[in-house]
Amino acid sequence: QVELVESGGGIVQAGGSLRLSCSASGMIDSINAMGWYRQAPGNERDLVAIMTTGNTKNYADSVKDRFTISRDNAKTTVYLQMNGLKPEDTAVYYCYYYQPNRDRLIYWGRGTQVTVSS
């Protein structure tokens, strides 16, 4: 099993910044993909940003040039720096973890609320 612990959500005014963190522990593998999805009320869970097993960074079009994903060298913690936040960024943000060589399961964090006021 893999446990994901997220932190960094909160309430911010439009134009502000937040930094999310997610740490993985348990039966983890150094070959993994980690990233962030978000879900607003009434919507599906959508990709925000992800770092693949090959360290490629992929972003949703709506957050390119505003959000930056990164992770530590041990590949156990992933960060999401969110700048220029907009009210439409309001959602619950979920950490994503996938390790293709170990159990090939997708793990999710419990989610952290991000609220952007106008």
Image (cartoon, grey):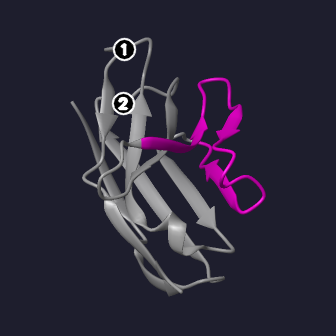
Residue 91's x, y, as percent? 39, 62
- In this picture, which residue range is highlighted in magenta? 46-73
**Residue that extends furthest to the right in the rendered view of this protein:** 65
Amino acid found under the numbered disc labelled 2: Ile
Residue displayed at 62% across by 67% down: 82
Q: Classify residue 3 by image quadrant.
A: top left
Q: Identify the element where label 2 is drawn.
A: loop
Q: Quadrant of residue 59?
A: top right
Residue pushed farthest left?
1
106, above or below 8, in the image = above
Question: On the rendered image, what quadrant is the N terminus found in?
Answer: top left
The residue lying toward the viewer, choosing from 20 and 117, is: 117
Which SS class for mark 1?
loop
Would you place residue 29 above or below residue 102 in this image? Answer: below
**Which amino acid type is marked by label 1?**
Arg
| Mark 1 neighbour density, 10 Å: few (under 14) some (14–19) many (20 or more) | few
**Residue at position x 50%, y 85% from top?**
12
Q: Is label 1 in contact with label 2 (beta carbons under 8 Å)?
A: yes
Residue shown at the point (68%, 56%) measured from the top left: 68
Give the residue pinned by disc 1: 102
Residue 13 lies left or right of residue 56; in this view the side is left
Q: How many marks?
A: 2
Q: Earlier in the sequence, mark 1 or mark 2?
A: 2
The reply to whether the magenta stretch includes residue 81 is no
Q: Position of residue 11 (x, y in %)?
A: 42, 83
In the image, taking residue 56 as reference, residue 16 lies left or right, namely left
Considering every residue shown, the one lying at the far front of the view is: 42
Point out residue 75 in the picture as x, y percentages from the top left corner: 54, 39
Residue 51 part of the magenta-drawn span: yes
Asked which quadrant contains residue 105, the reply is top left
Residue under label 2: 28
